[in-house]
Each structure stands twice: as C-alpha cells, then as structure tokens.
Image (cartoon, helix red, strand yellow):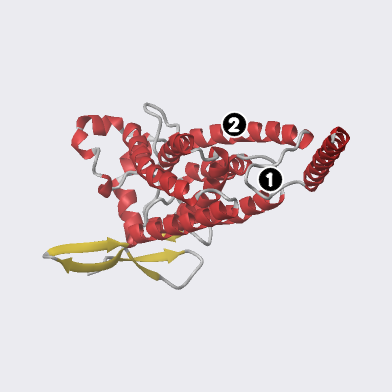
Amino acid sequence: MSDFTTVYFKGLEKTFEIPSVLAEFTLFGNEISIKFYGAIIAFGFTLAVLFGGRMAYKWKMSLDKMIDVLIYGTVAAIIGARLYYVFSKWDYYSANPGDIIKIWEGGLAIYGGIIGGIAAAFVVCKVRKLNFWNLLDIAGMSLLIGQGIGRWGNFTNQEAFGVNTDMPWGMWSPKVQEYIILNQSEFAANGFSVDPNKYVHPTFLYESIWCLLGVFVLYIITTKFRKFSGQTFLCYGIWYGLERMIVEGLRTDSLYIAGTQIRTSQALSGAIVVVCAVLLVVLLVKYTKNPKPIEGIDYFDADVLEKEKMKNEKVALEHKAKLQMKNAETEKEV
C-alpha cells in the first residue's frame, strides 16, 4: 500500500494527502517500490538534459561529445554528492564505513554533485576538444531546471523543511512532527529549537520557485546580454548562491562544519557569491571594452558583428586586388 501523509498549510482550509510511493509491483518474485522522490528527480533530470541538448544544438556543439559529458558527469556528480555528505558527517561514517555506499538510504549533497560533475566535465571537454565554458553556461540553466523540479521530491518525502513560521504558507504534517521530535537534541546542539506542534517553513518550495524563476532570468541574460563564455554560469553561481545562503539558514537538516555551528552550505554559498560576482564584474568590464565573438554561438553584440563584417569585406577586397595585380603581371609577361 502507498504511504500517504496529510499535509496542512496555515493559510488554507484544504488538506493534502501526499503519497511517497508512486507504484508497487512484483517482478520475478521481487517486491518493487518506485518512490515519488526518485521519479520526480528523474523527471527534472530528463527535462534538464533535453534543454541542455537543445541549447547545445543551437550553439553548434557536438551532441556526441555532449553525451560523453553527460554520462561521465552524472556518475561523477553522484559520487561527489555522496562524498560531500559523508565527509560532512565523518564522525558517523568513520565508525560505520560499510554505510558509505548506502546511497539508497539518503545522503546526497547538491554542492558535492555540482563539484563532481564539473570536474568530470572539465576532463571530458579537454579530451574531446569541447568548449568547457560554453558547456558550463548551458549547465547553469539546466541545473536550475533539475533543482527546481527535484525539490518537489522533498515535498513528497516531507523533508528539507525549516524552522517554525507564522506565515500563511507555513506547513505541518505528522512526518514533520515526528522528525522534529526525534531530532530535538541535535537542534539544541546546533543552537536553535523547533516546536513540533507548529507550522514550519516549506524551504523546498522557496528553492523550487527561486530556481525555476532563475531559468528565465539566466535565459534572458544569455540571449540578450551575454558577452563571454562562462558569463551565464557565473550568474548561476550568484543566483543560486544567494538563495541557498539565505534559505539554508532556515533549514533544520543542514550539514555543519565539524565542531562548529556554521552551516557548510551557507558558508560555501557565501563564498561562491563573492567569487562569482567579482569575476563577473571584472570580465564584463574587460569584454565590454574589447568585445569578441563567442565561439560557435550566434549571440553577438551588433557593433561587433558590424566590425567583423567590415573586416571580412576589407580582407575580400585586398584579396581581390592582389589577384588583379597578379593577373596583370601575368599578362605583361605573356
């Protein structure tokens, strides 16, 4: 039977019966259970890949090479996401090394996945001669699609929520209450408290809305204001980092820097925002003063296009003049 939980929102009279199981069946004598969490993650991943493939085609990037990046990048992202989580809870996993490989029990960190995926993509791009920075720009928009949709998997599991709130969109469910009761000592150790009988911030929703909005923002930047390869990804770092830096401070399930009450993702997000903002400003100034066409992409500044056209016409005229001189000299010799 499917596992349902009743979810309440403070500003709504209607309640929602949310299932965590999409389908259950028997296959060759084995009981198979497909969770909504996994299905939603897969759906978000599929849309992100389709969008990325479309952009790669539009930018004249090799789809064959992109598939290599996708395969190796996905594997590395899963490994990176797991390692990030394991090292953040090393006190437990050092004592229980056999649990490190049990990713089916949960424990994947998005930043670890991004780091692992980018590292693998860099290597593949070098080997397969693919523009790494253009790839990152596509990845920035694709990641926001996957993250925005994937967060609804957290809703079906009733996880990734925040501390108490009196806002109309505050959320409560028996699963939320159970988690809060079981983790009271951990909350206290990290310097905050949560009342299990009150509504909490649906932080999964905040991130979902922010990421999906970001897809449109980054797409407009890419199609209208992009001056160099890598610009969109820097904007992704700022956009997602700002949201994560704020929302992470509300969550009850954060990973912490060992021996401190500093949330790992919050600190990392702040650093990413600063680094990406500085690089973005410096490179925008550079390429505004000295604009250059972007390799393989048709998003060029009008002035740059005109200069390139005049340059090509000049070269053509010079070439024509040389041919005429050569022909004239040949005729004299004859």
How packed mark 2 is, by other alpha carbons closer than 10 Å (few <14, some 14-19, many 20 or more), is some
In this image, 332 relative to 58: left or right?
A: right
Q: Where is residue 218 shown, x and y percent of the image?
A: 62, 50
Instruction: Depth check: give the residue in front, 65 or 136.
Output: 65
Q: Which residue does the image show at 39% across and 65% down from the upper left? A: 7
Q: Visible in this render: residue 166?
A: no
Q: Are marks 1 and 2 in contact (CB under 8 Å)?
A: no
Question: Which amino acid, mark 1?
Answer: Arg
**Vertical comparison of 188 with 199: above or below:** above
Label annotation for residue 182:
none
Q: Quadrant of residue 318?
A: top right
Hey, which residue is sitting farthest bottom in the picture? 14
Look at label 2 and name its amino acid.
Answer: Val
Counting every numbered tag in the picture gives 2
218 versus 169 height, above or below: above
Q: Residue at x 37, y 38 (%)?
A: 80
- Of the 4 image quadrants, the one containing the C terminus is top right
Residue 97 x, y percent position in the rendering: 21, 33
Whole-Å distance between the Cαs marked 1 and 2?
A: 19 Å
- Apparent side of residue 309 relative to residue 163 in the rendered image (left or right): right
Q: Provide the secondary structure element on which disc 2 rests.
A: helix
Above or below, 47 relative to 190 = below
Disc 1: which residue: 226
Residue under circle 2?
275
Task: Work out whether mark 1 precedes mark 2 in sequence or the reverse, and give the earlier one.
Answer: 1
Quadrant containing the N terminus in the rendered view: bottom left
Residue at screen point 38% across, 42% down: 72
- Label 1 element class: loop
Q: Nearer the viewer, residue 94 or 123?
A: 123
Q: Residue at x 87, y 37 (%)?
A: 328
